[in-house]
Image (cartoon, rainbow, N blue to C red):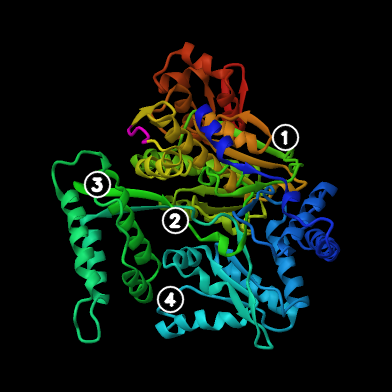
């Protein structure tokens, strides 16, 4: 991790928020009181609506200076990451700022606002428009053939010009960037018909900075079919770009289908190749986000290559690249609580600002089990393991029955776990979700506990190519490839790639934890984490310096072969209420020695099992109450 951390320190450009505010000018004398007034409104709303109980003077000052920067209409050469901690109230800051500005300065103020979820955007749009008493915010919705005609969808991009605030999802921002169309959002028309700049871009949580795409020969065939579909002019004649692109894509396809390529580096075909401008334009008009992402992935594979591997006997190439949003078209601010440590920001393309004071988090307890990784593969290989994990989750939920518990698992296990926990969910004691890249959400604020069944591992090819794009390309070096299996799990041979993986997994766990908004709660928050990688756990620990961490060992045998203590626990579970059994009967029936049984009696798991199943001991007899 040391080399990775040194690179991270070298490239991250941390600044104080004061570096972006106006001081001692006529403009500043107007901005500063307004920023302070918005802060007061923000604090009142956090207290009355969100029940925030510990807003410090330092946090209020940081909010005021952040509002100050948003009010300052001066060009910023790089995006600024507002790395205020989770539960600081960043989303509430943005909403309050937009409402105040649209209501009071409709003839001059304009902004583009990006969030991950469509429902959150609809709520924000309604908040702004209700506060103004007139529609000042407009939401561009993604294309849905069940809802929109193609013409209706395209009309949105014309209609948006009449509104101060333009709202879109991170996927829409990504799509418009892929089609080189962000410049069309940089202005709006006032009620008086004057053209004004939308100079501010506010992104609530991190957009997709690193895009990963996997291509097979079949994908390339489908891509060329899409190109052919749009390549005929009004007279039915093929446009000139078709044959140019077809020839080079056929070269890539031939390499993929060739037998001489081994797992590892996939060579570039033409490092200077760019998709023809006319093709990009025609393609963007005809197709949606996924096809546009494929177009850019094909372009990237042609000019940079990627990582070759086989899946079910089919050759595939994975390529990961950093996406550029042409941020300097706007004054861009990214509100991201983990922006100071997220590996995708590992470059000098951003400024990072954060408050001096951290949130407390002394009310948070991490119970860390290093006996299991609970990987997706381990759960796939054993239905019994999933059942044992569900049994453990039920027990933990019962132990915290006065609070709601969030269970986070892999997408493929959500349906089964939700069904098995249906009673707990119906009683308001549990919620279930899957690991994902989603960040901001208030859906889980009511949960005071969380159980993480595994961690989000994005795949070997992803980490190999992502670390190359973010670290290797930045350093001008080719990172080593390959990985091995260790007791901690899959480990990459390259130190940068391994550190990138650990940091990425840890940041995802931090984001999952942040959904509980623990930093603003007076109640105790307990997190159950299963992972053998100490360095990865330490990265999580660094985000919560005042939180408590303790070792945890579940009484259930979650994966692998059962040992003597697991057999004893199963025996206790199977006893009938009121049943009284002699100690010698238990170890004889389990076919274990008396010495082995006695060794287990004083272990924490044995005592926990007795407590769970209501077992009492009297001399050499065990009774189930």
Start-end of magenta stretch = 478-482
**Residue under the image location 45 percent in, 19 percent down:** 587
Whether residue 578 is visible: no
Q: Secondary structure at mark 3?
A: strand
- Residue 311's disc is 3
Of the numbered discs 3 and 1, the one sitting upstream in the chain is: 3
How far, Cα to Cα, is label 3 from label 2?
26 Å
Residue lying farthest to the front in this orientation? 25
Q: Residue at x 23, y 66 (%)?
A: 224
Residue 416 position, x and y percent, is 43, 52
Please name the predominant secondary structure of the magenta segment in the image.
loop
Q: Which mark is residue 546?
A: 1
User: Dot 2 corresponds to which residue?
Assistant: 415
Q: Which mark is residue 144?
A: 4
Q: CA distance from mark 2 to mark 1?
A: 36 Å
Q: Which mark's residue is nearer the viewer, 2 or 1? A: 1
Choose between 98 and 194: the one closer to the eye. 194
Which numbered disc flags the more N-terminal residue, 4 or 1?
4
Q: Quadrant of the C terminus?
A: top right
In depth, the one of 292 and 267 nearer the eye is 267
Residue 622 vs 230, above or below: the answer is above
- Give the residue displayed 60% in from the left and 64% down from the top: 330
Mark 4 or 2 closer to N-term? 4
Asked whether 102 or 45 is in front, the reply is 102
Q: How far from the left and from the top, in percent, is residue 307?
A: 30, 43
**Foreground of the two, 481 or 384:** 481
């Amino acid at each position: 991790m040391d080399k990775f951390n040194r690179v991270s320190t070298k490239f991250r450009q941390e600044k104080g928020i004061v570096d972006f505010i106006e001081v001692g000018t006529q403009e500043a004398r107007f901005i500063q009181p307004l920023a302070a007034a918005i802060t007061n409104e923000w604090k009142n709303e956090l207290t009355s609506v969100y029940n925030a109980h510990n807003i410090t003077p330092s946090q209020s000052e940081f909010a005021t200076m952040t509002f100050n920067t948003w009010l300052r209409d001066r060009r910023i050469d790089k995006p600024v990451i507002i790395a205020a901690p989770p539960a600081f109230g960043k989303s509430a800051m943005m909403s309050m700022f937009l409402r105040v500005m649209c209501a009071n300065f409709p003839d001059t103020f304009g902004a583009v606002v990006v969030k991950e979820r469509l429902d959150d955007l609809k709520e924000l749009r309604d908040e702004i428009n209700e506060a103004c008493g007139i529609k000042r915010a407009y939401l561009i919705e993604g294309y849905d053939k069940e809802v929109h005609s193609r013409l209706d969808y395209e009309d949105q991009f014309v209609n948006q010009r009449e509104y101060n605030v333009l709202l879109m999802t991170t996927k829409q921002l990504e799509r418009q960037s892929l089609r080189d169309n962000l410049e069309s959002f940089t202005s709006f028309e006032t009620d008086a018909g004057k053209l004004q700049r939308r100079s501010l871009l506010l992104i609530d949580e991190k957009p997709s900075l690193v895009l990963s795409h996997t291509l097979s020969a079949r994908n390339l065939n489908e891509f060329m079919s899409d190109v052919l579909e749009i390549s005929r002019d009004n007279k039915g004649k093929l446009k000139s770009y078709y044959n140019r692109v077809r020839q080079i894509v056929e070269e890539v396809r031939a390499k993929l289908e060739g037998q001489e390529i081994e797992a590892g580096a996939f060579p570039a075909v033409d490092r200077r190749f760019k998709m023809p401008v006319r093709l990009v334009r025609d393609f963007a008009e005809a197709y949606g986000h996924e096809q546009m992402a494929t177009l850019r992935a094909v372009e990237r594979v042609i000019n940079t290559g990627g990582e070759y591997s086989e899946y079910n006997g089919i050759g595939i190439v994975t390529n990961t690249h950093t996406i550029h949003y042409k941020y300097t078209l706007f004054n861009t601010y990214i509100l991201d609580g983990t922006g100071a440590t997220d590996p995708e920001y590992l470059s000098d393309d951003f400024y990072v600002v954060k408050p001096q004071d951290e949130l407390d988090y002394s009310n948070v307890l991490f119970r860390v089990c290093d006996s299991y990784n609970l990987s997706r593969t381990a759960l796939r290989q054993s239905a019994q393991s999933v059942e044992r994990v569900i049994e453990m989750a039920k027990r933990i939920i019962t132990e915290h029955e006065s609070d709601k518990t969030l269970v986070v698992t892999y997408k493929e296990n959500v349906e089964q776990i939700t069904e098995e926990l249906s009673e707990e969910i119906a009683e308001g004691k549990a919620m279930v979700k899957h690991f994902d890249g989603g960040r901001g959400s208030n859906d889980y604020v009511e949960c005071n506990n969380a159980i993480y069944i595994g961690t989000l591992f994005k795949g070997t090819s992803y980490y190999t190519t992502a670390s190359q794009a973010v670290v290797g390309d930045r350093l001008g070096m080719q990172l080593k490839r390959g990985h091995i299996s260790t007791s901690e799990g899959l480990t990459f041979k390259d130190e940068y790639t391994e550190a990138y993986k650990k940091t990425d997994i840890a940041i995802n766990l931090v984001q999952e934890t942040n959904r509980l908004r623990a930093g603003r709660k007076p109640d105790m928050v307990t997190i159950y984490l299963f992972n053998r990688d100490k360095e990865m756990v330490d990265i999580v620990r660094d985000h919560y310096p005042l939180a408590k961490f303790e070792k945890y060992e579940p009484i259930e045998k979650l994966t692998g072969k059962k040992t003597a203590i697991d057999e004893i626990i199963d025996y206790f579970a199977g006893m009938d209420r009121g049943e009284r059994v002699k100690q010698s009967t238990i170890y004889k029936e389990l076919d274990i020695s008396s010495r082995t049984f006695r060794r287990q009696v004083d272990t924490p798991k044995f005592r926990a099992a007795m407590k769970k199943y209501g077992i009492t001991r009297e001399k050499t007899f065990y009774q189930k109450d």
